[in-house]
Image (cartoon, rainbow, N blue to C red):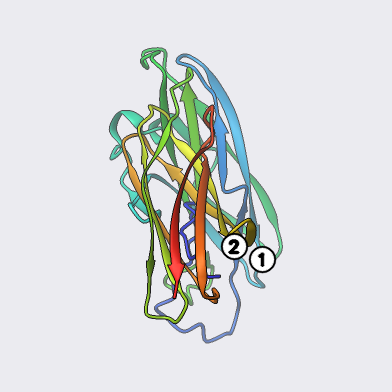
Amino acid sequence: MRFPIATGLAVLLLLSNATNARGATINMSLDPLVTEMHVLPGGADRTSTDVTNNGDTDERVTVEPIDWTTRLDGSISIEPVGTQGAHSLTKYLAAESYRFILHPHQVRRLNIALSMPQNVPAVPLSYWGGFIIKAFPLDGSLAIGPAATFFVYDDVGAPTRHLSILSLRASPVWMRRSFQIVARLKNDGAGYARTSGTLIIKRGATVVERENIPVGAIFPGHNRIVEGVITGLRTGHYAAELTFDYGGDVIVGADTDFTVP
């Protein structure tokens, strides 16, 4: 089975535009990549991520505030701070350092402070923001190095969460005995929906395929298309059952039938 779906947790690798003549390897990672907070107006809290130099040369690390969102296909769009308007959390976030050096295999815990001003509306609302963290060799042999994103969510109050499945269909594709499953989702709640799904393919009462589907964040008012290809099915009648857990009160689901000739 092949179900290539974007996860929404961005780990970016920015490709080099120069050759590293010395052969040194730079490799930077973050853990965690995402954190959720619950800071009310007038409140403050801290979070952190561990930045690791997995390479074999000294690295200069930079921390850049960003806004971000997800596209219809689940991919991540990095944006200037403030682009997300009332939902932008980044202007309330502060990193303890925006530039530092990591030696090979060194780990540094990067602390992030969140301070919500007293004048932030107390109405239930989801906020999100974060940083893009990049690594460069000190010798300047690479103009662009590896990077990863650290995303922060914050809920003020308890914004309602609800996800709807607008459509689900199974269609034959050019590969023999293969079908494409396409679902269209909509976040019609007031809070972000960090979503995961499960696809079950049945032939009669027998489960022939079960696949966990990472979907990632769907923001209020946004749609998402989830699609993938099922291969190697035998001739016969099938049912596709798709369910999504989005962190709300219920798990939503839909099903459709199809026939493999």
Callout 1 crowding tier (Cα within 10 Å): few <14, some 14–19, many ≥20 = some
- Tag 1's secondary structure? loop
In the rendering, at what x and y percent does residue 247 appear?
54, 33
Quick one: 220 or 154, which is closer to the camera? 220
In the rendering, at what x and y percent does residue 147 appear?
49, 61
Give the residue pinned by disc 1.
Answer: 54
Image marks 1 and 2: residues in contact by CB distance under 8 Å: yes
Callout 2 crowding tier (Cα within 10 Å): few <14, some 14–19, many ≥20 = many
- Amino acid at circle 1: Asn
Left or right, 189 with reference to 20: left
Left or right, 118 with reference to 3: left
Q: Residue 142 has which mark?
A: none
Residue 172 location, quadrant: bottom left
The reply to whether residue 147 is visible in this rendering is no
Give the residue pinned by disc 2.
Answer: 28
Q: CA distance from mark 1 to mark 2?
A: 6 Å
- Tag 2's secondary structure? strand
- Residue visible at 55% across and 44% down in the picture: 34
- Residue visible at 60% across and 68% down in the picture: 27
- Residue visible at 48% across and 65% down in the picture: 4
Quick one: 92 or 97, which is closer to the camera? 92
Quick one: 78 or 257, which is closer to the camera? 257
Left or right, 71 with reference to 37: left
Quadrant holding the C terminus? bottom left
In the rendering, at what x and y percent does residue 43 appear?
52, 16
Residue 234 higher or lower than 254, as above or below: below
Q: Earlier in the sequence, mark 1 or mark 2?
A: 2
- Amino acid at circle 2: Met
Residue at the limit of the structure toward the bottom, as seen here: 21
Quadrant holding the N terminus? bottom right
